[in-house]
Image (tube, grey):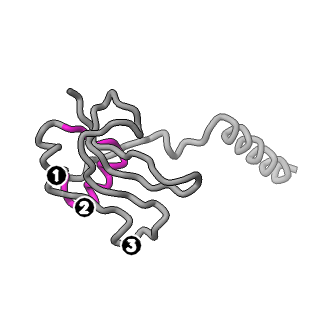
Amino acid sequence: MATKIRLARGGSKKRPYYSIVAADSRMPRDGRFLEKLGTYNPLLAKDDENRVKMDIDRIKHWLGQGAQPTDRIARMLEAAGVVEKKVRNNPKSAVPGKQMAERAAKKAARNAAPAEE
């Protein structure tokens, strides 16, 4: 069974509240899970200790059983010091899209035109 440690959404509309759960990867996001491992409340301030609550011992147990954390959970675990930081490289993140590149080219041409006169 492929197991994931992921977020399951709760809360009402525009008031998200997430449970950190160990679940079979084939189950839906808010569907059946194996065990609740903690909570995440994104509405709290980033420095609030109640923003992320995790049962570290149980998370280590599931990681030992082969459970794969999702990207967001992996970042939370890195911040808590449970797993080592992974080097991330996204070279395309700073490259503008097609329309923005066209606008920048037009602006550069417009700025260069008065200097030539």
**Direction right: furthest residue:** 117
Residue occupying image coordinates x 26% and y 42%: 22
Q: Say whether disc 1 or disc 3 marks the residue closer to the N-terminus.
A: 3
Label 3 to label 2, Cα distance in Å?
14 Å
Q: For the residues carrying marks 2 and 1, which lies nearer the camera in this image?
A: 1
Q: Are marks 2 and 1 in contact (CB under 8 Å)?
A: no
Quarter of the N terminus within the rendering: top left
The secondary element bearing badge 2 is classed as: helix
Q: For the residues carrying marks 3 and 2, which lies nearer the camera in this image?
A: 3
Q: Which residue is mark 1?
A: 58
Q: For the residues carrying marks 1 and 3, which lies nearer the camera in this image?
A: 1
Residue range (magenta): 67-83
Q: Position of residue 114 (x, y in %)?
A: 85, 52
**How many other residues sit within 10 Å of disc 3, few (<14), some (14-19) or many (≥20)?**
few
The secondary element bearing badge 3 is classed as: loop
Q: Which residue is mark 3?
A: 48
Residue 80's tag is 2
**Residue 68 drawn in magenta:** yes
Residue occupying image coordinates x 23% and y 29%: 2
- Compared to residue 37, the image places residue 91 above or below, namely above
Q: Is residue 24 left or right of residue 117?
A: left
Label 2 to label 1, Cα distance in Å?
14 Å
Q: Say whether disc 3 or disc 2 marks the residue closer to the N-terminus.
A: 3
The secondary element bearing badge 1 is classed as: helix
Label 1 to label 3, Cα distance in Å?
22 Å
**Residue 99 drawn in magenta:** no
Q: Say whether disc 2 or disc 1 marks the residue closer to the N-terminus.
A: 1
* 46, 33: nearer the viewer: 33
- Compared to residue 25, the image places residue 96 above or below, namely below
Q: Amino acid at mark 3?
A: Asp
